[in-house]
Amino acid sequence: MQQTIFIGLNAGGNPAPFTVLDQSRKADTVKANIGDEISFDSSPRGMTVEVDFFEGKSPFQEGTMVKDKTFHRVSKQGTFHYKCTLVTADGIRHGWPDNPNDGGTVEVGSGH
């Protein structure tokens, strides 16, 4: 299964994860299984999303930092916490490290 986590600015102007582009469903925790694919995208469009998983632990084999919109295959079981930053076209950064309260969690089960 493929899932996209949209990172948008919440009412306080801080990055927050949502499950849909219109930001109607907040996604503090996203559940996935090994073999699923997850991508991170910006809402509104046109911003760059940077996602960094804590403690050197990531559900993806590629590593702990994600800076693109491609789908990444989930390869590890466990609970993975991440922080996120939105970068506007003019280079202004919203989120980490200025605000440590942004980000979310990916919980990965063993499979289908």
Image: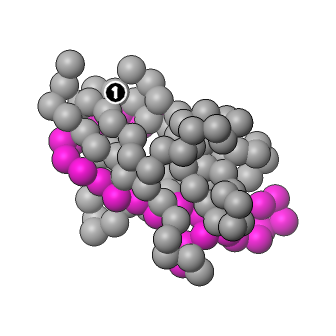
Residue in the picture at 64% in, 65% down: 14
Say which element carries label 1: loop
Q: Quadrant of the N terminus?
A: top left
- Vertical relation: 87 (above or below) 44: below
- Residue neighbourhood size for the residue with mark 1, other residues' Cα within 10 Å, grouped as few (<14), some (14–19), many (≥20): some
Boundaries of the magenta span: 68-97
Residue 87 visible in the current orientation? no
Q: Quadrant of the C terminus?
A: top left
Instruction: Read off the residue under disc 1.
Output: 36
Using residue 47 as the reference point, say whether residue 69 is left or right of it: left
- Vertical relation: 94 (above or below) 57: below
Residue in the picture at 66% in, 41% down: 23
Most distant residue in the right direction: 90
Residue in the picture at 60% in, 70% down: 95
Residue 31 visible in the current orientation? yes
Measured from the top left, where is residue 11 in percent x and y? 70, 60
Q: Amino acid at mark 1?
A: Asp
Q: Is residue 20 magenta?
A: no
Measured from the top left, where is residue 84 in percent x and y? 53, 61
Query: In the rendered view, how is the structure colored?
Result: one colour
Measured from the top left, where is residue 70 in percent x and y? 54, 36
Using residue 35 as the reference point, say whether residue 71 is left or right of it: right
Measured from the top left, where is residue 105 in percent x and y? 37, 52
